[in-house]
Image (tube, helix red, strand yellow):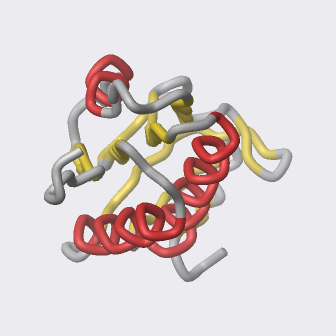
Amino acid sequence: MSENHDPIRLLDVRAGALSLDEVHAAVGDDAAGGTTLFVGTVRDHDGGKPVAALEYSAHPTALRELRRIAEKVCADFPVRALAAVHRTGRLEIGDVAVIVAVSCPHRGEAFAASRRLIDDLKHEVPIWKHQVFADGEEEWVGAGSC
């Protein structure tokens, strides 16, 4: 391994559809014995209430914050490769909202690093979810409001 190996292979916050193949390819590494891939999708309910519509919006610093947490995960775990992408805009039920993937030498490390990455992304990256429920009630959820 070269000294300037950067394990952060793909980070993005984008309006277009997310690709499992793109994220999985980004974390391929011959030295990794374990790769985890987490996919978050839009569900048809939240808090026991049916969801009619959902839209994600991101602060201009979202990508910078995503890099900060990715760097922390790489510092805390033996990450060989890491990728994280999050959608913005209007999403339909079943659409992919977020994908994170991590490759590490062993599966336990990959699971732990991936869990930290998605948890920190959801709690610290300024991306907000605007939900409209079937009864017309609305709710904003996101970093800092959990």
**Residue 132: x and y, percent?**
56, 51
Residue 36: name its quadrant.
Answer: top right
Total numbered badges shown on the rendered structure? 0
Residue reaching furthest to the bottom? 144
Residue drawn at point x = 55 percent, y = 54 percent: 118
Residue 23 x, y percent position in the rendering: 33, 30
Residue extending farthest top: 21
Residue drawn at 79 percent across, 45 percent down: 49
Please name whichever residue, 105 or 132, is drawn nearer the observer in this view of the structure: 105
Residue 44, visible in the rendered structure: yes
Could you tell me which quadrant the N terminus lies in? top left
Q: Depth check: 26 or 32 in front?
A: 32
Residue drawn where x is 65% and y is 42% of the image: 111
Q: Which image quarter is the C terminus in?
A: bottom right
Residue at x 23%, y 72% (from the top left corner): 64
Q: Is residue 146 above or below residue 108?
A: below
Q: Is residue 10 left or right of residue 86?
A: left
Residue 70, quarter of the rendered image: bottom left
Give the x, y percent position of residue 104. 50, 41
**10 relative to 123, above or below:** above
Residue toward you, 123 or 89: 123
| Percent of width and height locating residue 6 | 21, 54
From this viewpoint, is residue 140 visible? no
Left or right of 40? Residue 51 is: right
